[in-house]
Image: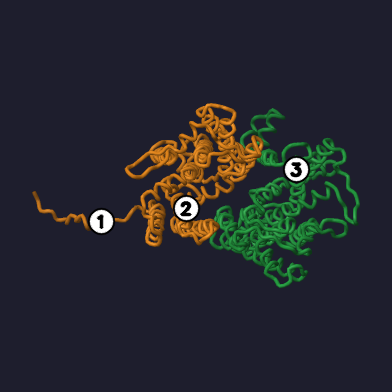
Chain colours: A green, B orange
Amino acid sequence: MPEPTSLVQRVLRHQLLWPVLALFVLLLVNVVAKPSFLDVRMQDGHLYGNLIDIVRNSAPVMLVALGMTLVIATRGIDLSVGAIAAIAAAVACTRIIGAGDEAALRTAVMAMTYAVVVCIVLGAWNGLLVSVLGIQPIIATLILMVAGRGISMAITDGQITTVNNPWFSDLASGFVLTLPLAFLVAVGMVLFTALLTRRTALGMLIEAVGINPEASRLAGVRARTIIWTVYAFSGLCAGLAGLVIAANTNSVNANSLGLWIELDAILAVVIGGTSLMGGRFSLAGTFVGALFIATLARTIPNIGIPSEVNYLFKAVVVIAVCLLQSPKARALLRVRRSGTPTLANGAPA
Amino acid sequence: MSAVTVPTASAWDRVRTYRPPNRYLPILATAALFVGLFGVGGIRYDGLTDPQVLLSLLIDNAFLIVLGVGMTFVILTGGIDLSVGSVVALSTMIAAKTLDMGWSPYLSIVAVLATGTLLGLLMGLLIHYFDIQPFIATLAGLFLARGLTYLISVESISIKDPTVTDLAFRTVHLGDYYVRWTAIIALATVAIAAYVLARTRFGRTVYAIGGNEASAMLMGLRVAFTKVGVYVISGFCAALAGLLFSLYILSGNSLHAIGMELDAIAAVVIGGTLLTGGRGYVVGSLLGVLVLGIIKTLISFDGTLSSYWIRIITGVLLLAFVVVQRFATRRRP
C-alpha cells in the first residue's frame, strides 16, 4: 500500500475519521432540533451549557472505557467494572460517614484513596484469574460482576447511603479553570495513560500480548505481568468512575450505581476503533467514543424522544460499528461496489 | 458345561467398583451439592424437608430453568447470549401490552414467541455470517430488546386478562402437593432439549461445533444452520421464559429481569457445562438452577441473612466451578 501523502488522503485514512464524523453528525442533529444547543455561557466564573454537561457526564464512561481499552488490547474484556464502581462508591461513602468529621477535606481524600486501593486489589484479582489461572477473561470477570453488587450491598448494609461532604461532591459538580473537575480528571487520566503507553514501550508490549500472548512471552515480554497490570488498571479506572458517579448524587445505591456501564464502556471502545480481537488500541478513539455516548444520551431527550429509548439507538450503533469493522461485511460491500465477486470470500480488509 | 474359570463379579462387587463415566462427574457434583444443601437446610430449619418446598422450587424458578436450557445450547457451541434478560423483559411487556389492547391470549403468546425467535435469528445471523463475536452481537440484542421494551411503555402494565390469570394460578395436584403449569412447561422444555441434544443430528452437531468448529466444518456438518439455530433456540427459550415470568409476576415492566442473564449463565456453569463449549448437559443446567434456588430458599428460611448474600454466594460457587473446570480440562487437553 503506498504511503498516503497529501493532507486529504491522510485525513481520509485516519482511523479517527469515522468516530469524529459520527460525533459531528450527532451534534448537527442537535443543532437542527434546537439551534441554541451549542450555546455556552459564563456564569459565576464557570462555563454552562449543553456542551459542558456533555463533557461532564462523559467522565465516568471515559474513565471506565480507558481501562477497558487496555484490557481489550490484550484480547481480554472486563465485565466487572460496573460492580467495581459500585464497590468503590460504597467503600468511599461508608468511610466518609464513619469518619469523625464528615465534611472535612481530609475525610474525603482518605475515603477516596481507600476506595481506589480496594478497586486496584479487585482488578488485580481479575488479573490473577486471567493471567495465572488462565480462565477466559469474559468468565473470570463475570464472577466479580455477579458477586460485586452483593459485596457492595454488604458494605452499605443494603441501604442507599447518603453522604454530606462538599469536597467529595466537588469531584462531580466542581469546576476548575471554568471546566468541570470530573472531565478534567478523566482527561488527565487519558493523557497520563497515553504518555505512559505511547512514549514508552508499554503500549507496544500490550499490543504484542494481545496479538499472541505465547509468542510475546517467548520473545521476552512478561505477558503475565502485563495482563495482571491492565486488569488492575481497569479496576482503578472503574473505581474512579464509581466515585464520580457517587459524588454526582452524593449517595450510593449499590443496585443501580454503574449499572450497564461496562456495556457503555465497551461501546465507547468499539466506536473508537479498538478491535475486540485485541492487538491494537486507540486512546484518542476511546476519548471520542465516550464523548459520542454522552452526546447520544443528551441528544435523545433533545429531539423529543423519551430518554430511556436510547438503548435502542445504542443497539443500532453497536451493530453498525461492528458491521463496519467486520471483514466479511466489508468484503461484501466492496464486491457490490466494484463488481468483482472473486474477492468475496473472507478477503480481509 | 465347563467350569467357569473367571469368577463372576457379585452384585456387590459391581456396585463397589462402579465408577460413573467422567463426563457425568460435573453433573453428579452439582447433584451432590444440591442434596447437600437440601440436607443441611433440612437439619437446620423445620419445614424445609416438606416435598412442597421442592415443588415450589420448580414453580419459582420455572422461567430460569427455561432460560438455562436456551443458554446451554449457546454455551455448548462456545458462544454466549447476554440478551436473554432483556428479551424476558420485552416478552413480559409485549404480553402485557397486547393483552391490555384486548388481543386474545393465544395471539399474544404467538406474538411474544415470534419476537424472541426473530431476535435470536438476527443475532445468530450477525454472529455467523459477519463473524461478529457472540458477546458483542448479543450485547446489541440486550440494548435492542431493552430499548424496545421502553419504547412500548416506560410504565409498568399489569396483566388482568382472566384466561391468563386463571392459567397462572391453576394448579396440578399430586396427592397432597401441587405444582403450577409453569413448572410442568419448564420440565417439558428440559426433556425436549435433552432429547434434541442427545439423539438428534442437530444436537450432536452442537457438541461438534463446541469441540472444534473447524473440524465440524471439515466433517461436512451443517455448521451455519446449527450455529444460527442455537441462537434461535436461545431467543425462543428467552421468550418462553418471559411468558412464564409474566405468569409468575403478572405484569409487564421494562425494569424486569435486569441481570437475569447472569443468573442463567451462572446456572449453566454450576450445572457443569464447559464455558469453552463442547461438554455439558441440560439436566446439569436444571440442577444448577435448583442449586441457586435452594440457596435463595435457605436464605429466606434463615431470615437473618440479607438477600444480597445470594449474589455473593452465587459468585463464590461460580468461582469454584470455573476453577475446578479449568483444572479438570487442563489434564485432558
Q: Is residue B177 visible?
A: yes
> Are labels 1 and 3 assigned to the same chain?
no
Name the chain under label 2: B
Q: For this rendering, which residue is in front, A163 or A248?
A: A163
Q: For this rendering, which residue is in front, B126 or A199?
A: B126
Name the chain under label 3: A
Q: What is the distance, in whole Å, between disc 2 and disc 1 at their CAs? A: 31 Å
Which residue has dot 2 on it?
A: B292
Q: Residue furthest left?
A: B1
Query: Given the image, on which type of amino acid does mark 3 rest?
Result: Leu
Do callouts 2 and 3 mark residues in contact (Cβ within 8 Å)?
no
Q: What is the distance, in whole Å, between disc 1 and disc 3 at their CAs? A: 66 Å
Disc number for residue B15: 1
Point 44% across, 44% down: residue: B59
Point 57% across, 45% down: residue: B257
Residue A171, image x, y percentages = 77, 60
For marks 1 and 3, give the one nearer the viewer: 3
Residue A330: name its quadrant: top right
Name the chain under label 1: B
- Relative to A316, is B205 on the left or the right? left
For marks 2 and 3, give the one nearer the viewer: 2
